[in-house]
Amino acid sequence: MREIVEVPGISDAGRKAGVPLSAAVRANGFIFISGTPPIDIENGGFVKGDIAAQTEQCLRNLRYVLEEAGSSLERVCMVRVYADQKHYAAINDVYARYFPIEPPARTFVPVAGWPFDFDVEIDCIALA
């Protein structure tokens, strides 16, 4: 069985941008979280600033989406980070604060650019 999870602020931002996706899907004991950019949930725009500020917001949003879907950062099994490789070290500094002990499996996917005004996006798979 597959269930779409409506996430206030995040789901709305995706629809507003015209992107055909669900913020989160619960299926077979897992939660699948779509790529989560540094959305400012309060105003729907993107958080501006350096890569550390953007990564921080992405991870806050990821935690929020997971909690809305009935999971948590502690239950994350796999993470993918999408960003320019020049940001690798700065992203790791922020990321390590969110996953300080026994971090999940992770892939860093270098990207050249985005169709929107941000520099990093993070998705994950977690246990429900």
Image (spheres, rainbow, N blue to C red):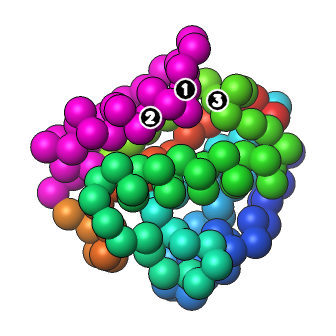
Along the line of sight, the residue nearer the viewer: 116 or 88? 88
In three-dimensional space, the C-alpha distance between marks 3 and 2, rounded to whole angstroms, equals: 13 Å
Nearest to viewer (mark 3 / mark 2): 2
Residue extent of the magenta highlight: 83-112
Along the line of sight, the residue nearer the viewer: 69 or 94? 94
Q: Residue at x 64, y 29 (%)?
A: 76
The amino acid type of the residue labelled 3 equals: Val
Residue 100 relative to residue 46: left or right:
right
- Tell whether label 3 touches label 1 (CB within 8 Å): yes
The amino acid type of the residue labelled 2 equals: Tyr
Q: Residue furthest top?
A: 102
Q: Residue at x 74, y 36 (%)?
A: 72
Q: Is residue 40 visible?
A: yes
Q: Position of residue 74 (x, y in %)?
A: 70, 26
Mark carried by residue 95: 2
**Which numbered disc flags the more N-terminal residue, 3 or 2?**
3
Mark carried by residue 99: 1
Q: Is residue 34 magenta?
A: no
- Tell whether label 2 touches label 3 (CB within 8 Å): no
- Tell whether label 2 touches label 1 (CB within 8 Å): yes
Q: Is residue 27 visible?
A: no
User: Which residue position is annotated with label 3?
Assistant: 76
Q: Position of residue 73 (x, y in %)?
A: 67, 34
Q: Position of residue 41 (x, y in %)?
A: 62, 73
